[in-house]
Amino acid sequence: DTAVSQTPKYLVTQMGNDKSIKCEQNLGHDTMYWYKQDSKKFLKIMFSYNNKELIINETVPNRFSPKSPDKAHLNLHINSLELGDSAVYFCASSPGTGNEQYFGPGTRLTVT
Amino acid sequence: GQQLNQSPQSMFIQEGEDVSMNCTSSSIFNTWLWYKQDPGEGPVLLIALYKAGELTSNGRLTAQFGITRKDSFLNISASIPSDVGIYFCAGRLIAGGGADGLTFGKGTHLIIQP
């Protein structure tokens, strides 16, 4: 199936740990994104990558580092996890900048 | 950052009723998108709008891009139980920082009473 996929679906970890979330899209899209959805369901852009280059970084702590090995993958690495990092993280992709975006199923991160 | 004011925050309706929700902003957007999110899932794109005044339908859903470029609405006709979920508007700014990411409204929770 053509889609945006993320792993893991659920991630429970302790404060101070380092974790990664992986995202892959097989839609042939050029641009990929990471969004954070908080407990009130508010979605906010974190990062955007276009052809493996970071093009936005919306005031995200530098503990969060996106890595794109190729244009089909955009992984999110988080260092020194904090309680406030608990949220659902969505990966998305689009054919180019300014086009409609397609979202993955989300990764629910719980920091204890 | 830019904000989209989405209303209503929640709706309790009877099956078969029509639904209307909208988003407004003080900023001009060049793209409006409407998404639906089911519990435990990612947002699914319903309708994309690219031109001011554009009216687009997708089955029982109809959305319009406001003439001023500062608003959009989504209508659902003859609601059915599977319409339950959270509906998000999202816009992309014409200019400004972070223009390539979408700005999302806070969502409209649609609840259908049997």
Image (cartoon, rainbow, N blue to C red):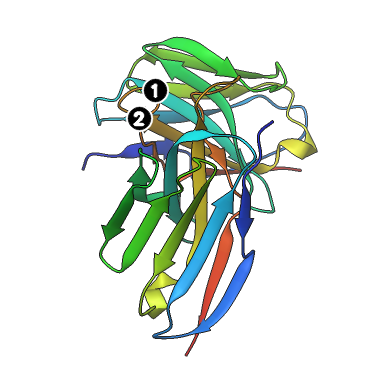
Residue B33 percent across, percent down from the top left: 42, 45
Q: Residue furthest bottom?
A: B114
Question: Could you classify mark 1 by the number of other residues whose Cα lies within 10 Å: few (under 14), some (14-19), or many (20 or more)?
Answer: many
Mark 2 belongs to which amino acid?
Answer: Ser
Residue A38 percent across, percent down from the top left: 67, 46
Residue B5 percent across, percent down from the top left: 64, 50
Front-lying residue, A33 or B78? B78
Q: Are marks 1 and 2 in contact (CB under 8 Å)?
A: yes
Say which residue appears at 34% left-offset and 64% top-offset: B61
Residue A28 percent across, percent down from the top left: 24, 25
Q: Residue furthest top?
A: A53
Residue A94 is marked as 2
Say which residue appears at 36% left-offset and 43% top-offset: B49
> Pointer 1 indicates a residue of which chain?
A
Task: From the viewer's perspective, tell me whether residue A12 is left or right of residue A97.
Answer: right
Compared to residue B79, the image places residue B32 above or below, namely above
Task: From the viewer's perspective, tell me whether residue B14 is left or right of residue A60.
Answer: left
Front-lying residue, A94 or B1? B1
Mark 1 belongs to which amino acid?
Answer: Thr
Say which residue appears at 59% left-offset and 20% top-offset: B96
Element assignment for label 1: loop
**Which quadrant of the figure has residue B95?**
top right
Total labels: the figure holds 2
Q: Image quadrant for the N terminus of chain A?
A: top left
Element assignment for label 2: strand
Front-lying residue, B22 or B13? B22
Q: Are marks 1 and 2 on the same chain?
A: yes
Q: Residue furthest left?
A: A1
The residue identified by callout 1 is: A97
Q: Distance of mark 1 from mark 2, alpha carbons?
A: 7 Å
**Which quadrant of the figure has residue A102?**
top left
Task: From the viewer's perspective, tell me whether residue A89 is left or right of residue A50.
Answer: right
